[in-house]
Image (cartoon, rainbow, N blue to C red):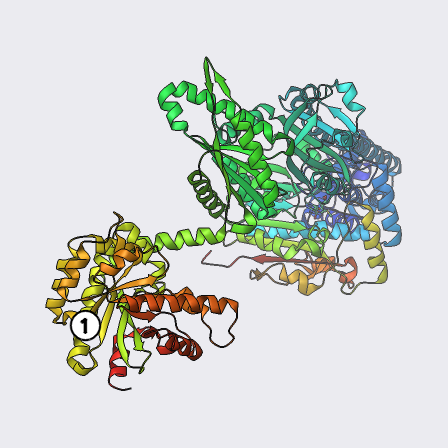
Amino acid sequence: MQQPDGAPIEIDLSRPSAARVYDYFLGGAHNFEVDRQLADQIAAMTPNLPATMRAGREFLRRAVRVLLDAGIDQFLDIGSGIPTVGNVHEVAQAANPQARVVYVDIDPVAVAHSRQLLAGNESTGVIHADLRDPQRILAETRALHLLDFDRPLGILLAGVVHFVPDADRPGDILATLRAAAAPGSHLVISHSTFEDQPQEMLDAQRLSARTSTEITLRSRAEITSFFGDWTILEPGVVHMELWRPDSPSDVAADAQRFGAFGAVARNDDVAG
Amino acid sequence: MSAVGAPGGRAVDPAGAHNYATEWAQAVRRLGFVPMSAADTERLLLSYTLRLAEALLHADEVAPVAAEVGQALVEAHLTEPDMIEWSVRSLADRLPDQVLGGSTGLDDRIAVAQGALAAGFARALRDRTFAQQERIARSAWQARDDVERALRDSEARFRAVFRGAAIGIGIADVDGQIIDVNQPFADMLGYSIEEMRQLNVTALFHHDDAPGMWELYGELIEGKHESARVEKRYYRKDGTSVWTDLAVSLIRHDDGRPRFTIAVAEDITQRYELQRRLRFQALHDPLTELPNRTLFFETLSRLLSASGRVGVCFLDLDGFKAINDSLGHDVGDRLLMTIARRLAGCVAEYGYLVARMGGDEFVILVDGDAGVDNMIAVAELALTAVSAPVFIDDHQLMVSASVGIVASDLVGTSAAELMKAADTTLYWAKAEGRGRWAVYDPERSARDIARSTLLAGLPVALDRDEFVLHYQPIVSLLDGRMLAVEALVRWQHPELGLIGPDRFIGLAEETGLIVRLGEWVLRQACRDARRWHVDFPEARLVVSVNLAARQADAPVIVDTVADALSSSGLPAELLQLELTESAVMGSGGEPLRTLYRLAELGVRLAVDDFGTGYSNLAYLRRLPITCLKLAAPFVEGIRGDEPDAADHRDERIVDALVRLAHALELWVTAEAVETEPQAERLRALRCDSAQGRLFGPPAPAAAISTRLAGG
Ligand SMILES: C[S@@+](CC[C@H](N)C(=O)[O-])C[C@H]1O[C@@H](n2cnc3c(N)ncnc32)[C@H](O)[C@@H]1O
């Protein structure tokens, strides 16, 4: 549905969209029949998946809180999806009303939706762009004059890097984004993995090809490499549920069931 | 107020409420997605617990409060069906016991609260769902609108460009079928838009299309190129042609398959014509409109590098300057125009290029059959065309021309060389008179060139001491003694090496340089002879020096000879001067006066090449001559080895000449004696002395010294 330059050439509402399927799993009604059908199919094959989605959202919320506590007050949320509930700007602005957030997504419907929802919120911006073109994301973000690239920035890549196949060189994309961030910046990534996973997870991954994009599962090492030379915060690259849970009771014995790693790193480069 | 109406005077137990909220929070977090931390969830649910508990104690508040809580649950996004189920059931099963100390007497209110909570929840959820559905649909349409507007905008922009452009734009599918063109394109080719839409681009082939143009188009529609740019000529509907600057771009399907081509064409006919006119002007002579020398040389070079075999007739009018001077430039110009027309006409059918090289010079470039016969035929055609009378005003002019003919196979493939040869050949033709042609002769040209090289070098050579003398022995046929040596001049040319006198004496005579050269020879020979006389006095070796007619003719020769003798110290009787018969006779037909004065000096005089001129024997008898040298042809006729008729005739002549000489009391020397049998015969005929290869070739002075020394 996308031309290489990022301009949509048509919107096909008869195909499910990752953003709307995700919204449905989170209990939202920002979705259509096709999205719900696919979501139900996925859920039927992998009963864990709705919980995985929720776990991803919860990881993001916890990570944002950690960043806020570290003094980060500006966020670049790439692959933001349809902000159903617990959006980054809600979490951030609840803690710091001055916090600024720029949302980026490839899905034109998600972007249009975000714009509607955020109309009138002066501290947020929405960009329609492709993660695979990080230069453009950076340029458009700068053009909004919302974020100050000379100050620490929170870059959020929750549940999105796995949509970028190896052929599109995700390592280079991450390097470009990291290079644009001032010292003290934080990078948040959650990413699906095949490590510790049963077969049905891998089958579901194949099914997700029916949304616009296919998912590439990656190893812990690969995901770790996306942080480059930044300092990975405790507890490292771990199954999402294990990343700084609200309470020990939130952690189930089978934390690996969600099939996704989460981690946060900080740019400790003094020279930069 | 709180206790009023509370059944049994019950009150809310804070600790119980706390416990209830904790369980509730754990339940919802277990049952579905909660976008809050555990603590926040518990805090939120504690407030609901307290409100519900208070409401159950006041009959009139139960329904509205429970409904509000139901709505608040939706707002907090606690919307999972399992969550509401837990919340509704626990309102009856747990809350009264845990928070209110039991349900006794509250059953009706609890049922009301359950109903109101569920209704409030359902109403809020329905509203939220409607709102979200509405929002997502609006977003979808908005997004679709954005995209469509972008498409419409770009389509509109394209349409605007397409319709409004001054330039021709056309779209065709990959089969070449034209789908649409704009008005300027249709106008350019003289069709209506409708007619153009019926055409296939292959119908727009033009025989002038550059090679490879259609292959390029084929590769374009196969997707091998994105675009191509060419200069293309089109036939208009009316058959005339139009030149365009054409750019064709490929439009692909989403999956990359070629879909359309878009052609953008600009009419450059005028620019092209202008260029052509400018080029014509640059390459043609304005007076005659014939190709000029630039175009001629361009064409010549191209043909030479292509085939290599071309011919040129280089033509120049005879006496044109006289016509120009006497009748004026206007008549001269009109004559040239007429001649130009005739020349172009006479070879028009062969397609030969006729160019004006400037002034009254024209050239016909024969390509194809450049054989000599055809070239001569062309030259004669041209001469005939020129020779017909030309009428200008009331003048009748008879003109002729000369033609130099050159074919490239004789000269090589350099245009400059070819034209230089043509120029030389034209000069030969002119030298032979008017109305002639001449064919280039490489040997003659080489001679001409050598001649002029030598001619140019002669005067300097004398100053630079480039001449040397060689001496050829003259021996007695009686006893074989060397009686004399003939001085023969050689030119030690810095580039050409040692050159014999036959190649430069003629030139020296033509230019008059012979006088200075002759004097040098004389003085040098005297010096050498004096040396031999000093070294070998008893040899009494005579040195024999040739005097050219021009030298002998000049009265100063006597002083020169006298001075050569005195300054060298050579006794006069050891110097012999050789003159040809004609030199002896002088230009006046009478013998030279100077001979007597030379003879008075005491030098010996010999007649060279005797028998080849017309000697007046009467004079011969009275002249102070001491020797006759028999011309080489008579001597060559005497072979001695196989006597035949010819030998006999030459022998008889030699015999007669020897007798004649002896009768006149003259010595006889035979020249060019090559063999012993020849020498034998000459001896038998009583010839006195001889010279020739048999007795030694011309050699440097040192070699003669050696021979005198007995070497
Ligand atoms: C699973 S959702 C994640 C939403 C949100 N970040 C979260 O973690 O709750 C993935 C989102 O990434 C977007 N996405 C997928 N590929 C993308 C790409 N190449 N560039 C930008 N966004 C992309 C999808 O449209 C979708 O909205």
Query: Depth check: B310 or A268 in front?
Result: B310
Residue B241 vs B128, above or below: the answer is above
| Residue B359 picture location, percent across and down | 42, 30
| Residue at x 14% of width, y 72% of height | B571
Query: Depth check: B300 or B47 in front?
Result: B300
Using the rendered view, name the quadrant where residue B583 is placed: bottom left
Farthest residue in the top direction? Answer: B394
| Figure quadrant of the N terminus of chain A | top right
| Residue at x 49% of width, y 23% of height | B337
| Residue B573 picture location, percent across and down | 17, 71
| Residue B228 picture location, percent across and down | 66, 38
Using the rendered view, name the quadrant where residue B60 is placed: top right
Please say whether residue B193 is visible from this viewpoint. Answer: yes
- Classify residue B574 as left or right of residue B664: left
Please say whether residue B89 is visible from this viewpoint. Answer: no
Label 1 residue SS: helix
Q: Residues within 10 Å of mark 1 (few under 14, many from 20)?
A: many
User: Which chain is indicated by disc 1?
Assistant: B
- Classify residue B26 as left or right of residue A96: right
- Residue position for label 1: B574
Query: Depth check: A250 or B523 in front?
Result: B523
| Residue at x 76% of width, y 64% of height | A195
Using the rendered view, name the quadrant where residue B137 is placed: top right
| Residue at x 79% of width, y 26% of height | B199
Residue B492 vs B372, above or below: the answer is below
Query: Depth check: B544 or B684 in front?
Result: B684
